[in-house]
Image (spheres, grey):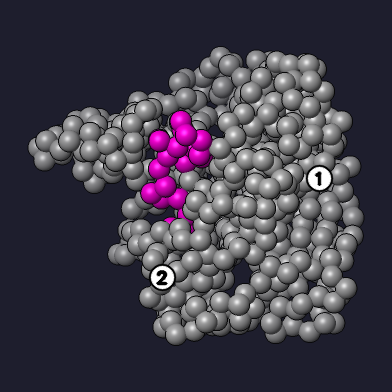
Amino acid sequence: MKIVSKFPVKTALAVAILSAGFTQSAFADPFLPGNLIVSETVYNNAANVTIGQTLSGGGKAVADGSSLNVFKNEVPDPSFGVSSAILLKQMTTSGTLLNTMTIDSNVMTTSFASKSELALNISTDGKSVSFMGYAAPLNQLDVSNSNTTQAFDSTNPVTTTNARAIGSVNLSTGALSVIDVNAYSGNNGRAAIEANGQYYMVGNAGNGSGNAAQLSALSDNTGVQTISATNPGNGNTTVIGAATAPAGSTGYQHGFSLTQLQDPTKAVGVNYAADKTGKDDNFRGETIFNNTLFVTKGSGSNGVDTVYQVGATGALANGGVIPANAAITILPGFNAISEKVVEAASGAIVTANAAATTYNTAHAAAIAAGTVTAHAFQSPAASSHPFGIWFGDANTLFVADEGDGIRTDVVNVLNKVTTNAGLQEWQNIGGTWTETQIFQTGLVGQLDTAAQGVLGWTVQEDGLRNITGQKNADGSFTIYGTTSTVSNEITHDLGADPNQIVAINIFANSTAANTAFTVLQTAAAGARFGGVAVAPAAVPVPAAVWLFGTGLMGLFGSTRRRKAN
């Protein structure tokens, strides 16, 4: 582990507007309790690419290195990206920027426009915030699909080698420590949480076309990984999750395999066939609640897009660790249908409603006859893309759904489904999780008019990626998140479009119809927000204080508060 630097603050305001309940003198600390910490990255080097140059992931550049054009190079090079600096911004909960910490790019960068990166997680002891990136210099091409030394894949079109990196900032001193790790070869690490002296990471591996042995090595390198935070050795991580098939066989996974589930389109007792090796555990969001680790999967055509528990309930209590052979299981009540089944039922050129009707009609008789399992059945229109998750309490779980990512141009928008995009609220009822509401107002479909004026194409919010929150003294919840975006420009990487930081207050009688998101900050063109965290506070902030700070008191002032559990 390397202690890299102290907090290099760039003051944003001469006189900061303080979060409620704290004094001016408290701002001597790097991150004040109760303030937001937001990760951001900015692309700003037009000299990176020239038209016609050979790209490291294949093909020749079709666009120059300007921020408006450079990410159109994902057309000839699907691995295209540019390593960029990591910024940690401190904001009040009303969105006022207080200061910015620039992570030393000599030791750690991220990849623009890898939209699944830079999640922020507070350690379980409340002392630090962690995130993932790369041990790569600024302005290196295709770093997010480079190999690592532990699982080098000769079939990967990106031939460079870069360790992934875990960064951690002490919230009291501002000291940055970085550990280089060999996880997630050929793809990216998305998030890391420190608990009891261990980092628990999620991410994906693989970017080639290797044989069974190579795919098994990459499977060992993906999913949930762990490493000591104080004694990382050579950076080789340990995969969490018992192997579900022999190494070298099709469907060799760690912790969760599609083969463990009943196939609802087949006779009772017939499980799914094995999926592509290593891809059932392509996780991207994570949180720890009540000493238990939870992760999400919401992308790729393999496995199940849903919410999972890693290991036993309370495994991290009393200084515990999650063992390497831990089970990874779907939370009761959450989606348990193969993404391939959902995609096949949805169809490539029909609307979701028509596909759902076809799917339901085709299987109604079988369900009634008991030859297909009805308990796991849901229509394709209900397909989700889970990203960040946050527990309000033991019986309330909020899930960020980033939307389907389908562009809004005239051709593609015909297939767009917004059913589950936004913020899902789930309640634990008798041990089974039930989705009660989906909050979309003020978020899904909202236009970023400022970006349109600069970019020349329309950008709109598609859903949420990373989220965090707080349970307020009156029993309500305040959720903060970073958004996902789509646009009508069909040749560039959608992850390069500027997104937003949003917030929403949820009371006992809040509904999707009477509750809306408010925008705290919008990224500038050529910038992207990643994750969001709340610096641990000793006392919860009442929702009324937050509403006053955001100017929404009049909207919710007469709303009945959620009673504390």
Span of residues in magenta: 404-424
Q: Which quadrant would the C terminus be assigned to in this image? A: bottom left
Give the residue displayed 23% in from the left and 38% down from the top: 357
Q: Position of residue 282 (x, y in %)?
A: 53, 37
Name the residue: 82% across, 23% down: 50
| Label 2 crowd bin: few (<14), some (14–19), many (20+), radius 10 Å | few
User: Is there any visible trace of residue 465 in the rendered image?
Assistant: no
Q: Return the x and y of residue 99 as percentages of the image width and height.
A: 82, 65
In the rendered view, would you say 213 is above or below 120? above
Q: Main secondary structure of the magenta part?
A: loop
Q: Is residue 554 left or right of residue 261?
A: right
Instruction: Identify the image quadrant of residue 372.
Output: top left
Q: Left of 550 or right of it: where is 142?
A: right
Q: Mark 1 falls on what kind of element?
A: strand
Depth order, front residue of 555/541: 555
Task: Characterize the local packing of mark 1: few (<14), some (14-19) or many (20 or more) Cα atoms within 10 angstroms.
Answer: many
- Residue 305 image label: none
Residue identified by numbered label 1: 85
Q: Circle 2 — which element?
A: loop
Q: Earlier in the sequence, mark 1 or mark 2?
A: 1
**Residue ID for mark 2:** 514
Residue type at mark 1: give it. Answer: Ala
What residue do we see at 70% from left, 26% from top? 73
Mark pair 1, 2: CA separation: 39 Å
